[in-house]
Image (cartoon, rainbow, N blue to C red):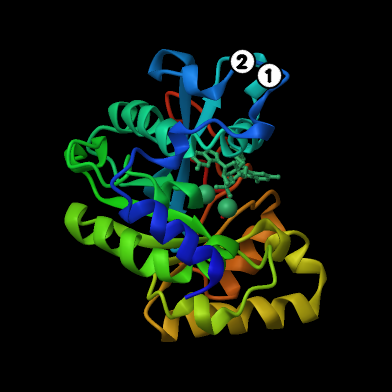
Amino acid sequence: MSGRDKRLRWTFSSDDLDREDESSPEASAPGRSTRLITADDLDVVLQPIVDLRDGRLFAAEALVRCRWPEYASPVALFAQAEKERACGRLGRPIREVAIARAAGMPLFLNIHPEELSSRWLVRPDDPLSFHEGELFLEITESAAFEYFDLCRSVLKEVCTRTSAHLVVDDLGAGHSNLKRVLDLEPAIVKLDRELVKDLDKSHRQRVLVRSVTALCKDLGARVVCEGIETLDELKAVRDAGADFGQGYLLARPGYPMPRPVWPL
Ligand code: C2E
Ligand code: MG
Ligand code: MG
């Protein structure tokens, strides 16, 4: 267990209120505190994930949009929530909105690594427990690597209890140890746009994507390619053996969720 994992584990097993509820010295924000965000301040857009065999809709990924202009980008929103140790608290209203908007549909939800050490995600009354469709919980490759033990304990426990599937997101964006990440036995691996962009133009990249895809599939994970923007990238990811695709070419994120186009 890494030092970082140990610290997070302590937080998780502590009887005190989450450390999220302690203020941190760096927490002061140019904007308002993310702790004040409620479901009314959030929008969730849905982006289709399609089956690359025939373009049929497989599932939707929920992507948060905060109505406060200073946190319009989800990256800025979570960067500030991280400083305020409020990621666990923030995840809950996001799931409330996402699950209400995607009723009954197979749904991919992003989980911030700091959520693994908060009590919010594991609460039995979390909206996760009430979703009627299939659930897929995404953790980024770098978090899967850095918080391996927490992913194996907390995330796997949540997945078992809620019948959700574990997904490793953004594979290829970092420099993680592929074997270690796959040791989490994810049901799905999402290849980052870094690997998909200009795939049709680079033979070396195609060899890499084909090999990584085959390895994931041999180890029991299905593969989603993210960030498909051109027809040639779409053909290339399909030829590389990926199962599912996601990207602006097929559909942008939106609510109501746009119907995917299938140009092949
Ligand atoms: P992600 O989970 O990898 O989500 C994919 C991002 O790629 C989304 O950006 C999506 O809008 C964008 N995208 C989709 N198709 C294309 C494409 O064809 N080309 C390009 N260039 N981009 C594409 P978004 O919504 O800005 O989200 C950015 C990141 O913020 C997400 O990356 C995820 O890590 C995080 N995030 C978003 N929503 C949530 C959330 O509800 N919870 C958590 N914990 N993180 C979230
Ligand atoms: Mg994602
Ligand atoms: Mg991603």
The C terminus is located in which quarter? bottom right
User: Which is in the foreground here, disc 1 or disc 2?
Assistant: 2
Query: What's the residue at 17%, 42% (across, down)?
Result: 124
SS of the residue under disc 2 = loop
Query: What's the residue at 41%, 84% (across, down)?
Result: 219
Nearer-the-camera pick, 21 or 178 = 21
Residue 256, image quadrant: top left
In the displayed structure, would residue 221 be above or below residue 136? below
The local crowd at label 1, few if under 14, some if 14 to 19, many if 20 or more residues have their Cα within 10 Å, is: few
The reply to whether residue 187 is in sight is no
The reply to whether residue 238 is in sight is yes
Please tell me the numbered disc located at residue 32.
Answer: 2
In the displayed structure, would residue 215 be above or below residue 231? below
According to the picture, the residue beneath numbered tag 1 turns out to be 70
* Residue type highlighted by circle 1: Glu
Residue 75 drawn at (x, y percent)? 64, 37
SS of the residue under disc 1 = helix
